Amino acid sequence: MSADRATTLRSLPSVDQLLRRLADRPELRTLPRGRLTALVRELLDAERKRVLDGRGAPAGADALAARVVDRAQRAGVFSLRPVINATGVVLHTNLGRALMSPLALERLAAVGAAYANLELDLATKERGSRYSHVEGLLTRLTGAEDALVVNNNAAAVLLALETLAHGREVVVSRGELIEIGGEFRIPDIMLRSGAVLREVGTTNRTHLRDYAEAITPNTALLLKVHASNYRVVGFTAEVSSRELVELGRARGIPVMEDLGSGSLVDLRPYGFPYEPTVPETVAAGVDLVSFSGDKLLGGPQAGIVVGGRAVVGRLKKNPWNRALRIDKLTLAGLEATLYAYEASTALETVPTLRLLTEPLARVRSRARAVLRRLAPATRTRLAARVVDDRAQVGGGALPTVELPTAVVALGRDASDAMSLDRRLRVGDPPVIGRIVDDRLLLDCRTVLPHQVAGLARAVSAAAEPDRG
């Protein structure tokens, strides 16, 4: 390093000097000291590197302090933050999937702020089962004899396979060897469970005789996997749940069905295509049915298993069940969600169902309300207008369904749209939209009514020419 450059670097403030300069900044009052120190060190290291690379003179202490404040404000105190979902994807996995209902949030707060009878029988003062809080709800709603809840549906499938088929064969159609987000693959889960995969049929056509011919003395389970996130169309054939149950009973082999997104209600009256419901699958005689809690059910993340008392009982006794069990907050949210179905209020109170079935006119009204809140100059600058479009269910559910929606389209070209998208993502609150045909679309099917004003403010702030 040259003497001149060393002298230049000495003009940079020390960590302590910059911290003292920032000590009275009200914007940093809630930021822990250790985090602020780390932020200062990171910024000073970056400034030294910039100077050493010959990219200009070092910034002054005031400018550096302003950068620290800006970075701290952008990052926020908490990493996990609420965002405005303007993607139009109702069950957006990266944004947390299902929203909790007001009752679920109320129950989460009540149970989270106090001790609870998680595993205590209040009548006898003896140890109870955490599953008792939702078992009755699940059996009444599905018609099953027993129920169990673990932390997600992948865990439910893993637990079932390890319990029922470790070291033995599981027969499954090639057309149902699915992969979902996060690289969850049925063959991989089967391998980890210790079960042996026995593929039958072809990608597009599997017949009952294929299952029958594959059964050996080492067969432990017949597995059916619902294609939640894709569809095979054209020259196809698959075996129904009822047919597979009849074969399993004739051969003395249990049948399991992984329904994936798993719905408790028939959505066809609202214009959706046929999707097998959990009660319907249980009624077909399937011994074990698994599904997610945070998809079409509209509750917290969970893997729900319902079925015959004997087979569910085996899963409950598996030591792996303790490692996969859910906590009191998940139980509180799930119990409240299931209660809405039992009380026949789910379509009005469970946000997922409400967002999926909301009439286009109401979605369009929200989009127009956002547009009206933008200043005329902002609307002109962004070429903002409301247009009809198509949204998605998401979460690996109903893959062929496109929901009618209304979006606020912004941006004059690709560069404009991408710049606005970036500014919205780092704003407060962050706004997540989608770019289509060189325009940023803010889809109002997933923008909640109380977020309309906040979305308009965020767009207005992001449109300022001196930002970013």
Image (tube, rainbow, N blue to C red):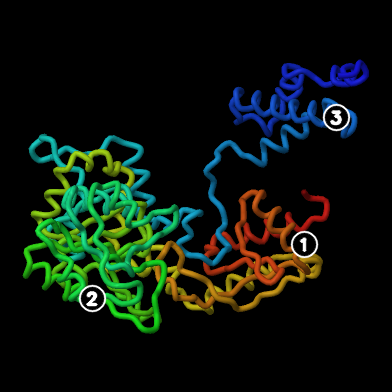
* Disc nearer the start of the sequence (1/3): 3
Q: Amino acid at mark 3?
A: Ala
**Front disc: 1 or 3:** 1
On screen, residue 446 above or below 466:
below
User: Which residue is disc 1 drawn over?
Assistant: 415
Give the camera-side residue of 237 and 383: 237
Q: In the image, 69: left or right of 272?
A: right
Closer to the eye: label 1 or 2: 2
Q: Residues within 10 Å of mark 3 (few under 14, many from 20)?
A: some
CA distance for labels 1 and 2: 50 Å
The 10 Å Cα crowd at callout 2, few under 14, some 14 to 19, many 20 or more, is: some
* Image quadrant where one finds the N terminus: top right
> x and y percent of residue 301 in the render?
36, 52
Q: Could you tell me residue 344's position as x and y percent?
A: 27, 69
Give the mark nearest the N terminus, 1 or 2.
2
Q: Say whether disc 3 or disc 2 marks the residue closer to the N-terminus.
A: 3
Judged from the image, the secondary structure of the residue bearing numbered disc 1 is helix
In the depicted view, which residue is nearer to us: 409 or 169?
Answer: 169
Front of the two marks 3 and 2: 2
Residue sitting farthest toward the bottom: 235
Residue 125's image quarter?
A: top left
The residue shown at (90%, 18%) is: 2
Residue nearest the observer in this picture, 154 or 282: 154
Q: Which mark is residue 239?
A: 2
Residue type at mark 1: give it.
Ser
Going 9% across and 40% down the picture, which residue do you hit? 123
Task: Kindly report the distance in space between the C-alpha atoms of the residues bearing marks 1 and 3.
Answer: 30 Å
Circle 3 is placed at which residue position?
A: 59
Q: Position of residue 266 (x, y in %)?
A: 30, 75
Disc 1 residue crowd, few under 14, some 14–19, many 20+, Cα 10 Å: few
